[in-house]
Image (spheres, rainbow, N blue to C red):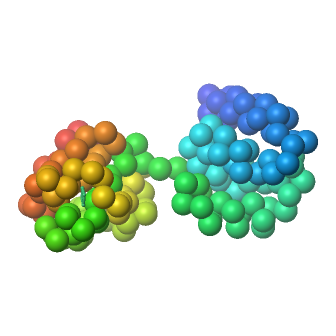
Amino acid sequence: MSAVTLKQNEEKFSKLQLVIDQWKDKEGPLMPVLQAAQDIFGCLSLDVQKYISKELDIPVSEIYGVVTFYSQFTLKPKGKYKIGVCMGTACYVKGSQAILDEISKELNIKSGETSEDGLFTLDATRCLGACGLAPIIMINDDVYGRLSPGDIKEIIKKYKD
Ligand code: FES
């Protein structure tokens, strides 16, 4: 680890410590602390879980159970670009499964995974509220509608470049 990352990490842990101090003696500190840690670090790695375990005096196994139960928490960092493929009814009927399969093939990841280069995280989502444009995907805040599998390569390429 370089000096810069080490320093950044120290800063993150001291931020987390402030949150822990704030919650330590209150009822049910775990969820708010985990939420803050997820925001600070972008994910809840085992190191972060161990730190919280020690500070709050809660077994790591219990923390791990909570982290893996709630979908808002992740163990690994998410990609720079989050791709959400809508699997709501309107999109599904118009072929969103084929879109999801195509992205999966293009990036070599399954739904819920992040690409090796750390660029993309792929997720299947519920209705994104733009059914008129079905089938749609979102990449961070960008919406792409009326897609066919043939469009995917070009779209992904834009984010890779
Ligand atoms: S079903 Fe896809 S946007 Fe509504």
Count of marks placed on residues? 0
Q: Which of the pair 87/101 is nearer the observer?
A: 87
Screen quadrant of the N terminus = top right
Tell which quarter ligand 1 is in: bottom left
Query: Taking the image as drawn, is residue 119 in sight?
Result: no
Which residue: 47% across, 50% down?
A: 78
Residue drawn at point x = 59 percent, y = 49 percent:
43
Residue 75 found in image quarter: bottom right
Q: Image quadrant of residue 89?
A: bottom left
Q: Which of 80 and 29 is in front in this view?
A: 29
Q: Where is residue 99 in the image (x, y as percent from the top left)?
A: 19, 64
Residue at the image position 82 percent from the left and 40 percent from the top: 23
Query: In the image shown, does 39 or 51 lie closer to the viewer?
Result: 39
Q: Please name the residue shown 29% across and 46% down the image.
A: 139
Indicate whether 46 appears above or below 95.
Answer: above
- Left/right placement of residue 127 relative to residue 153 reads right
For this view, does 97 lie left or right of residue 112? Answer: left
Q: Quadrant of the C terminus?
A: top left
Residue 137 visible in image? yes
**In the image, is 67 to the left or to the right of 84?**
right
Q: Position of residue 104 (x, y in %)?
A: 28, 65
Percent of width and height locating residue 126: 35, 61
- Quadrant hosting residue 58: bottom right
- In the image, residue 135 lies at what x, y percent? 17, 59
